[in-house]
Amino acid sequence: MEQKVSGASLKRQVTFWVIVLVVFIAFIYIFSTILLPFIAGMAVAYFLDPVADRLERIGLSRLMATVVILVSFVLVFALALTIFIPIIVNQFNDFIQHIPTYVQQIQQLIAKAQTMVLPDWIRNQLGAIKDNFSSIMSEGLSFVGGLFAQLWSSGKALVNILSLMVVTPVVAFYMLLDWDRMVAKVDDWIPRDHVATVREIAREIDQAIAGFIRGQGSLCIILGVYYGVGLSLVGLNFGLLIGLFAGMISFIPYVGSMVGLVLAVGVALVQFWPDYLWVGLTLVVFFTGQFLEGNVLQPKLVGESVGLHPVWLMFALFAFGALFGFVGLLIAVPAAAACGVLVRFALSRYLQSDLYYGRSEAGKARRAKAGKTENS
């Protein structure tokens, strides 16, 4: 049956969602200095809710399932914090210090190879290419260093580390314990005339967020561990740092693998040259990782598209990060997914309204013809 939407109804719905958006942005802006542990706790609870549901199905109470999950999560997080984080921080500091040396050595390798491989017209331009490359590298490093410094300073301004460690597990515990009851209570507040529509929107938002955070997040973690362990076994300097970094940004198609590949091969050339075997093994780590991602992990963990275009996702990360700091980075993906669903919903309603077809007899005829076409 064709669903007719009047222009007045469409305007009321758009007005309502605009007001909701304004209130949401105002709330985040006003309370951004204290929201980090609460949003982190909600993210942990949302990520682990399917695990709690599975434990309930095998016989555990919700309370016991929540306790088991949170204790396991805290233990794993504490282990990572005490063992892996210091190693990564030390590798990052050493990597930043060694970048000028690596760039210089790569330039020397190129200079040695140019007489054997490159034609004359490229060799004549190598001086300018080197200067431009050095300029781009210095500007890029300055940008990355400034970005990390800004995130670190904003993180300290938002909340200290102690409050994050104490409040986040508590928030996650209560959110995970009461998750199903909260969802049911919010469902009871929905106007009964619109409950089916709101449930459908919420279901699409949940699918988009779950597909990205749970599916893509798990994929990034697995790839980061695989790349980090693989490059470390090869013996690559800063292999753990490069591998984890490549895995963590794998949510952007091709960018994560390409950035990691360029960094790893660049370090491998400086470290291993002219031993081709270890450079080849470095390439093997990334190529096998791409094979696993495309043929095993992506279909199993993510499945179909979650409806988040990479460009829209990057814009959301930059925009929310600039507006709200580290808190903005945490809410960027859910907000981008929700906005995408709401925009698609608004567009579908617009295409069914008399604002699109018109109020004239010709507009009514066009609407009737479209309805017959859809039903046929």
Image (tube, rainbow, N blue to C red):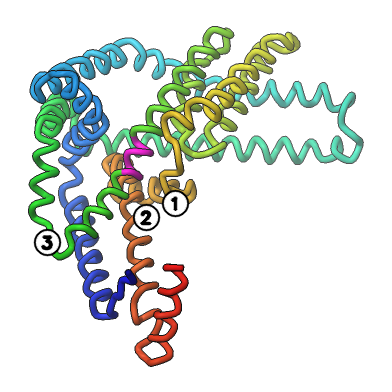
**Pointer 1: residues within 10 angstroms few (<14), some, or many (20+)?**
few
Q: Position of residue 20 (x, y in %)?
A: 20, 61
Q: Is residue 61 magenta?
A: no
Measure how far apart labels 2 and 1 are at the Cα level. 9 Å
Residue beneath label 2, please? 340
The kind of residue tagged 1 is Trp
The earlier-in-sequence mark between 2 and 3 is: 3
Magenta residues span 207-213
Q: Earlier in the sequence, mark 2 or mark 1?
A: 1
Question: Height in image: 228 above or below 210?
Answer: above
Q: Amino acid at mark 2?
A: Gly
Compare residues 128 and 352 and report the one nearer the observer. Answer: 352
N-terminal-most mark, 3 or 1: 3
Q: Is residue 371 visible?
A: yes
Q: Residue at x 24, y 15 (%)?
A: 78
Give the residue pinned by disc 3: 192
Q: Nearer the viewer, residue 338 or 111?
A: 338
Q: According to the image, label 1 marks what residue?
A: 312
Evaluate if marks 2 and 1 touch, with contact meaning CB atoms under 8 Å apart. yes
**Location of residue 289 with respect to 323 vertically, above or below:** above
Q: Is residue 209 left or right of residue 108?
A: left
Along the line of sight, the residue nearer the viewer: 175 or 345: 345
Q: Secondary structure at mark 1?
A: helix
Q: Can you name the residue that lies furthest to the bottom here?
A: 361
Would you say residue 101 is visible in this rendering? no
Nearer to us: label 2 or label 1: 2
Magenta segment, prevailing SS (helix, strand or loop): helix
